[in-house]
Amino acid sequence: MTEAMPDRLTLRRPDDWHLHLRDGAMLAAVAAQSARDFGRAIVMPNLVPPVVTAADAVAYRARIEAALPEGADFTPLMTLYLTEETDPEDLRRAHAEGITTAVKLYPAGATTNSASGVRDMAKVMPALEVMAEIGMPLCVHGEVTSPEIDIFDREAVFIDKVLAPLRRQLPDLRVVMEHVTTADAVDYVRDNPKNLGATITTHHLVINRNHILAGGIRPDYYCLPVAKRETHRLALAEAAVSGDARFFLGTDSAPHVQAAKHTGCGCAGIFTAPVTMPILAEMFEAAGRLNRLEQFASLNGPKFYGLPPNEARITMTRGEAWSPPAQIATGEGPVTVFDPGFALHWRVEG
Ligand SMILES: NC(=O)N[C@@H](CC(=O)O)C(=O)O
Ligand SMILES: [Zn+2]
Ligand SMILES: [Zn+2]
């Protein structure tokens, strides 16, 4: 006899430790999509121009708050975009005043809106030293950008050539490897427990590189770091359901209008905010680990950031298969909602 599968699940309200909310009409359309299921989010600073100073972060936070629905239970946790001109004293002030939760490192040219990123790590060492001193985490887009490095190898090479040396130099710096996509990254995090965590996205738990390229090119599955082969996806899924506190949810929900993705040079980013919790429930259930979903989505992230978990709870229920909308409308045009390619049975109540 098989045990009855639970059809109801109550968990602490989840958080999203890596989110792109954008600005203007896009922000107005997507803010509510995250605020529905999530209590807090680490908000990425890669606007054009980027959020580089404490004053920029204060202004951006006010725009986000203005875009949230009345009464939303959602706190944006702000980040600063690290540049070679970042003033370490501005970081110190932003941290002391509780304006920012983390700083984001984009290697120049690695991803969407990263032109102002870092070319020479030596130039940002004074800022990183201050962060290590005050305990401000560094969130890292971990890919090298040299054209001679194959795009599927860029994360693994980054670990060897940039991250490991940096962590040897500044062992007290708290680092989050954002959106890990490889078994190499999972192993590196497991083997180096001190001051290191990793976010895993919704889509990297679901797709491998075949989804982008087999049977036709699918720009809606294109993101950075690009999805890797199936063995890597399996390593990510195993890390997510393992209960290991160093791995936590960062959706990397990154809306782009369809016109910017369905084109000759489509941009990177997948919009997952509205479907993340139903997809995760489906995945954790299939792995027989539904009881670990709360650790991954609601407990491990706050633990790494030294914040209390949310007091509020959400309830998820399992029922008939349902189909999320294929797209949402925004003032800039439609945005495709991530399609996991399997039926969803779980929903967040309320
Ligand atoms: N993940 C992506 O493919 N795109 C992100 C940037 C990022 O997180 O690298 C975006 O801002 O669109
Ligand atoms: Zn990134
Ligand atoms: Zn991102």
Image: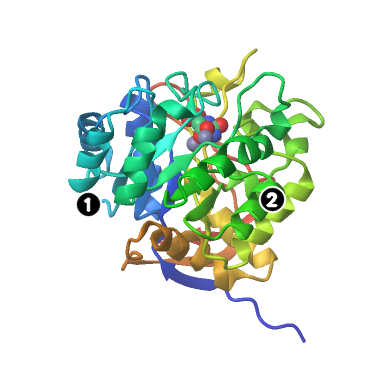
Say which residue label 2 marks.
Answer: 342
Q: Residues within 10 Å of mark 2 (few under 14, many from 20)?
A: few
Query: Quadrant location of the N terminus?
Result: bottom right
Question: Visible in this render: residue 32?
Answer: no
Horizontal and vertical percent position of residue 349: 43, 62
The answer to whether the residues at label 2 and label 1 have Cβ atoms under 8 Å apart is: no
Q: Residue furthest front?
A: 169
Question: Visible in this render: residue 50?
Answer: yes
Q: What residue type is labelled 1?
A: Gly
Q: Which residue lies furthest to the top in this view?
A: 264
Q: How crowded is mark 1: few (under 14 residues within 10 Å), some or many (20 or more)?
A: few
User: Looking at the image, is 276 positioned above or below residue 239?
Assistant: above
Q: Which residue is drawn at 45% across and 28% down?
A: 122
Q: Residue at x 60, y 45 (%)?
A: 180
40 or 300: which is nearer to us?
300
52 or 237: which is nearer to us?
52
Horizontal and vertical percent position of residue 46: 41, 28
Q: Which residue lies furthest to the left in this view?
A: 97
Q: Which amino acid does label 2 sit on?
A: Phe
174 or 213: which is nearer to us?
174
Question: What is the total number of numbered labels drawn onto the structure image?
Answer: 2
Say which residue label 1 marks.
Answer: 71
The secondary structure type at the circle numbered 1 is loop
User: Looking at the image, is 27 positioned above or below residue 8?
Assistant: above
Horizontal and vertical percent position of residue 236: 66, 53
